[in-house]
Amino acid sequence: MRHKYATRAIVLARHPAGEANATLTLLTRELGVVRARAQGVRRSGAKLAAALATFSESDVVLVRGAEGWRLSGAVLAEHWFAKVGSADARALASRFVGLLLRLAPVDAAEPALFPLMEELLGALASAPPESYDAIECLAALRLLAALGFDAGALPAGGFSPNALTEVAGDRRAFIARVNHGIEASGL
């Protein structure tokens, strides 16, 4: 019998796989970035569909098989897509996910990534649109630091107004650090 892994996950991407199935890219607390196959999730009335929408945070059950991960259950905990209401905020979150997926290794536990994504989505749900630029810059820099591509000091307080003011005040230096980190990653 295969071992089941129960964990909290954020759905980063979802791609069709066959007529009713989907391949999900999940960011999990314990396992890091995982690609898992979800069967029947694209059918009309599928029970797991709401829990597996993009930017949904769910408690999932994963099974490791010979062909990779398979999702066997999910319960919706937070629907970030609805909370991150504006199109600009969703576009920012999508750009961040694109960077995360390019930099973070699949199936390698990176414990700092899940809380970072959770904090980013929370900040986008509550921050005013004029702070989105600073949020994006700080999120990219925190991602690079978590993956070892930036060793500089980060503003204290996560995505607090003070941290965002600090980033906005010295935007050029922070963007230079982001660009240097991306260059160091080899992208």
Image: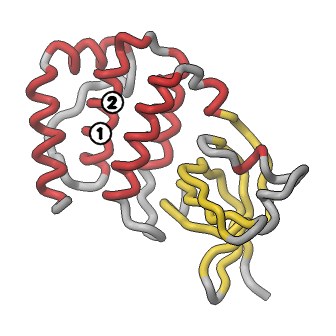
How many neighbours does mark 1 have within 10 angstroms: few (below 14), some (14-19), or many (20 or more)?
Answer: many
- Residue at 18% across, 50% down: 182
Where is the N terminus found, in terms of image quarters? bottom right
Disc 2 is placed on an element classified as: helix
- Residue at 69% across, 35% down: 78
Q: How many labels does the image show?
A: 2
Looking at the rendered structure, which numbered label has been put on residue 140?
Answer: 1
Above or below, 156 relative to 102: above
Q: Are marks 1 and 2 in contact (CB under 8 Å)?
A: yes
Q: Position of residue 103 (x, y in %)?
A: 31, 58
Q: Position of residue 15 (x, y in %)?
A: 60, 60
Residue 57 lies in what quarter of the image?
A: top right
- The foreground one among 146 and 78 is 78
Q: How far apart are marks 1 and 2 (CA)?
A: 6 Å
- The foreground one among 89 and 181 is 89
Disc 1 is placed on an element classified as: helix
Q: What amino acid is labelled 1 in the image?
A: Ala
Residue 173 lies in what quarter of the image?
A: top left
Q: Does any portion of residue 110 appear in the rendered image?
A: yes
Q: What amino acid is labelled 2 in the image?
A: Glu
How many neighbours does mark 2 have within 10 angstroms: few (below 14), some (14-19), or many (20 or more)?
Answer: many
Q: Where is residue 170 in the image (x, y as percent from the top left)?
A: 13, 19
Where is the C terminus found, in terms of image quarters? bottom left
Which residue, given by chain and number where applicable, does mark 2 sit on?
A: 136
Q: Where is residue 139 in the image (x, y as percent from the top left)?
A: 34, 35
